[in-house]
Amino acid sequence: MATNTIRVNESPLVLYCLRRADDALVMGHRLSEWCGRGPALEEEMALANMGLDLLGQARSLYTYAAEVEAAGNDEDRYAYLRDARQYRNLLLAEQPNGDFARTILRQFFYAAFADPYWRAMMKSSDPTLAAIAAKSEKESAYHLRHTAEWVIRLGDGTEESHRRAAEAVAHLWPYTGEMFEADAAEQELIAAGVVMDPASFRAEWDKTVSEILAEATLEKPAPGWMQKGGRTGLHSEHLGHMLAEMQVLQRTYPDATW
């Protein structure tokens, strides 16, 4: 562990904010990796805009986490001075972009959950989280529409695009179950009406995904074993590689200014 790695007091609310912020930051960073490499200029801009939306969500949640924790941390310290074991994002979020189909399916699976989740979170008893949710839901609704349209185009397109989309579904599916889990810390917030139970959105997510995959002529995988561990800091090697690049300046020159 680097000597300038921060310690975080992970109370239930702080932990919740960090988990959702980490989802958004890591996925937003993945989308930024498409800059200069998109299949078309218009789509490159769309991916970049979705990445910026997610970055904005991460900033809001990190800022609120810092306010609640009251330990001198801020959004930059959370992003740049925690190691991989301290990150709490979904394993789905950190999966490499791969080809265009894999990126689209990753974002679609996440957006199909995030849209109804943030819509429900607008009724949170915590006014700050409710305000963050109101903004995030509008963005997530667009992300869902955009990625769903691309899933259909890819799946019901050429033989090659169908093959790549089918491979993306099969590869990413085992990472989708983690979205619906809630541990004891989150259950405490659920009981207080502060956050919503992610498990309650499984049926809507399943309906959305089933309909889009069917229209795309893609086969929905059968229920099976799911990967998990991201919420407790157990990640794939992909996150460590991503953070090594993302954090290199801050780790090399701590508190650098220019």
Image: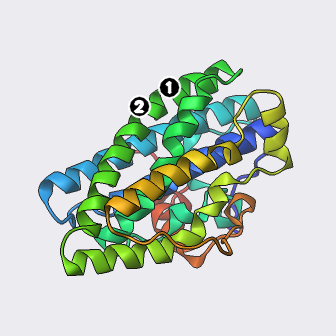
Disc 2 vs disc 1: Cβ atoms closer than 8 Å?
A: yes
Q: Which residue is found at the position 52% from the left and 65% from the top?
A: 94
**What amino acid type is highlighted by mark number 2?**
Lys
Q: Position of residue 175 (x, y in %)?
A: 58, 68
Q: Nearer the viewer, residue 118 or 64?
A: 118
Q: Which mark is residue 150?
A: none
Q: Is residue 52 visible?
A: yes
Q: Which residue is found at the position 67% from the left and 45% from the top?
A: 198
Q: Is mark 1 on a helix, strand or loop?
A: helix
Local packing at callout 2 (Cα closer than 10 Å; few below 14, some 14-19, many 20+) is some
Q: Where is residue 117 in the image (x, y as percent from the top left)?
A: 57, 38
**What amino acid type is highlighted by mark number 1?**
Ala
**What residue sits right under mark 2 in the picture?**
138
Q: Which of 14 and 214 is in front in this view?
A: 214
Q: Is mark 2 on a helix, strand or loop?
A: helix
Q: Which mark is residue 134?
A: 1
Q: Is residue 70 visible?
A: no
The residue positioned farthest toward the left in the image shown? 41
Cα–Cα span, label 2 and label 1 = 7 Å
Q: Which residue is found at the position 71% from the left and 20% from the top?
A: 125
Q: Nearer the viewer, residue 216 or 93?
A: 216
Q: Which of 228 and 34 is in front in this view?
A: 228
Report the label total. Answer: 2
| Left or right, residue 118 beside residue 210 | right
Q: Which colour scheme is used?
A: rainbow
Image vertical order of residue 104 relative to residue 207, above or below: below
Q: Position of residue 141 (x, y in %)?
A: 40, 38
Q: In which quarter of the image is the N terminus?
A: bottom right
Q: Position of residue 134 (x, y in %)?
A: 50, 25
Local packing at callout 1 (Cα closer than 10 Å; few below 14, some 14-19, many 20+) is some
